[in-house]
């Protein structure tokens, strides 16, 4: 068990805390979804009640070591001020500038300072300006950040799978460190799901590529009672069984691997469910996420997709088949949509599955959803408030479910 916020005495101290404020912005640099900011409020309010001087570090986007004004955290500071009902100090440009350091030094108990985007510094990701690994530069940057506070709190689950200055570096220079409430909650839910799930335990995996989720599928086959595969990666599995998939997305170099995974599922008596019908089209604009006016869209009679067509969603027979498995489950983990859900005509499968998972949760099923697209899907279905736990870290949750150690968690001391 990792040391948590309530395991250390923070009262009246100066605390450096890593949050995940990588929020979406529109063309006017307005925040379009503040869920990640809202999710940090419990930790922040606890610290402020303990009369802590709070210094927040975070990132936004991928500026690749350069100052990119459109990726400034200023909009976050404005929204955070509104949510907290008190000013949040902010200095743009450079998170370790003389001005930023003075602001941190002058910060009084009960005040909040948000430093500028960590990734304006290439050292945050442990790289040199040329893009090469540079551990010494990362360590020096971490030391600069650590010099501003007495305590470090890791509460950015979305970044703990990365070996960055703000995840593994700072802890080397601030001995008193712990995880915040958000990370604590993630570890609790994901850990309990893996170690002691209520059974039957069902995994639902979607998305585009088998290669993205090979390790997750392999890990789940050691733990679950059933697994549902949807999305584009289902077509690779179907092709490995000799089924015609038309011109659907496929990873031909993963066909043998799919056969191995089928064999492993059979050996472990895990139900392995694939779509038995599809929504298909002969034309789709993947870039703009729309359907050309002259496109033909129809539903197949079975799992076979005719030549010249691509699969874009699961069909009604598949929804019915999957629903029976979902209704029998007591624990459900879902990562990845089952079709191109961003296009209304191709979202029905994902939306119906989201509603079924929510209905199960209403009846006591433990449901955990991770991955940005999956989260967007349950929101689109209007059932996000009815899910047991929505993970804030797509990549981190996947790696956790694979059984990997997360560097940003490993670096935090045990209780």
Image (tube, rainbow, N blue to C red):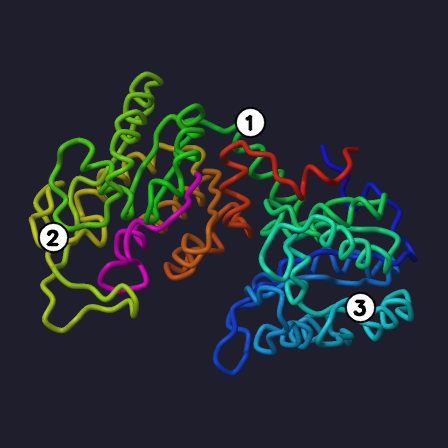
Query: Quick check: 133 above or below 403?
Result: below
- Residue 218, given in percent of the width and then of the height, sits at 40, 29
* Front one among 354 and 304: 304
Mark 3 surroundings within 10 Å by alpha-carbon count, few (fewer than 14), some (14 through 19), many (20 or more): many
Q: Secondary structure at mark 2?
A: strand
Residue at image coords 78%, 37%? 413
Mark 2 surroundings within 10 Å by alpha-carbon count, few (fewer than 14), some (14 through 19), many (20 or more): some
The residue identified by callout 1 is 195
The residue identified by callout 3 is 112
In the picture, the disc for residue 299 is 2
* Residue occupying the far top of the picture: 267
- Residue 359, given in percent of the width and then of the height, sits at 39, 46
Q: Quadrant of the C terminus?
A: top right
Distance CA(mark 2)–CA(mark 1): 40 Å
Distance CA(mark 3)–CA(mark 2): 55 Å
Query: Quick check: 195 above or below 408?
Result: above
* Front one among 57 and 385: 57
Q: Earlier in the sequence, mark 3 or mark 2?
A: 3
Query: Quick check: 229 above or below 199?
Result: below
Looking at the image, residue 204 sits to the left or right of residue 403; the answer is left
């Amino acid at each position: 068990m990792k040391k948590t916020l309530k395991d250390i005495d923070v009262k009246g101290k100066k605390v450096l805390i890593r949050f995940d404020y990588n929020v979406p912005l529109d063309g006017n640099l307005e925040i379009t979804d503040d869920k990640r900011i809202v999710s940090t409020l419990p930790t922040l309010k606890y610290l402020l009640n303990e009369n802590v001087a709070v210094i927040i570090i975070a990132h936004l986007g991928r500026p690749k070591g350069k100052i990119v004004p459109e990726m400034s955290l200023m909009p976050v500071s404005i929204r955070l001020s509104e949510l907290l009902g008190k000013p949040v100090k902010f200095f743009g440009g450079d998170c370790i500038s003389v001005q930023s350091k003075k602001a941190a030094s002058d910060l009084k108990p009960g005040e909040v300072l948000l430093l500028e985007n960590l990734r304006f510094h290439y050292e945050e990701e442990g790289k040199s300006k040329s893009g090469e690994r540079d551990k010494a530069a990362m360590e020096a940057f971490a030391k600069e950040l650590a010099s501003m506070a007495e305590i470090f709190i890791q509460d950015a689950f979305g970044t703990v799978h990365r070996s960055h200055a703000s995840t593994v570096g700072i802890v080397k220079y601030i001995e008193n460190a712990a995880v915040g409430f958000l990370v604590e909650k993630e570890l609790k839910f994901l850990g309990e799901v893996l170690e002691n799930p209520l059974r039957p335990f069902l995994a639902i995996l979607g998305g585009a590529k088998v290669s993205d989720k090979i390790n997750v599928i392999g890990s789940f086959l050691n733990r679950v009672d059933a697994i549902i595969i949807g999305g584009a990666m289902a077509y690779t599995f179907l092709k490995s069984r000799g089924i015609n998939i038309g011109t659907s997305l496929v990873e031909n170099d993963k066909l043998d691997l799919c056969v191995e995974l089928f064999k492993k599922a059979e050996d472990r008596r895990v139900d392995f469910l694939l779509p038995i019908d599809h929504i298909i089209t002969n034309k789709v604009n993947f870039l703009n996420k729309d359907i050309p006016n002259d496109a033909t869209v129809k539903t197949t009679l079975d799992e076979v997709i005719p030549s010249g067509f691509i699969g874009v969603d699961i069909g009604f027979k598949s929804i019915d088949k999957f629903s029976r498995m979902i209704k029998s489950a007591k624990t459900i983990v879902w990562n990845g949509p089952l079709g191109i859900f961003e296009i209304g005509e191709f979202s029905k499968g994902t939306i119906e599955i989201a509603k079924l998972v929510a209905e199960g949760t209403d009846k006591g099923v433990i449901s955990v959803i991770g991955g940005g697209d999956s989260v967007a899907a349950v929101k689109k279905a209007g059932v996000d408030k009815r899910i047991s736990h929505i993970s804030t870290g797509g990549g981190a949750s996947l790696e956790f479910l694979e059984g990997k150690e997360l560097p940003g968690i490993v670096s935090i001391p045990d209780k």
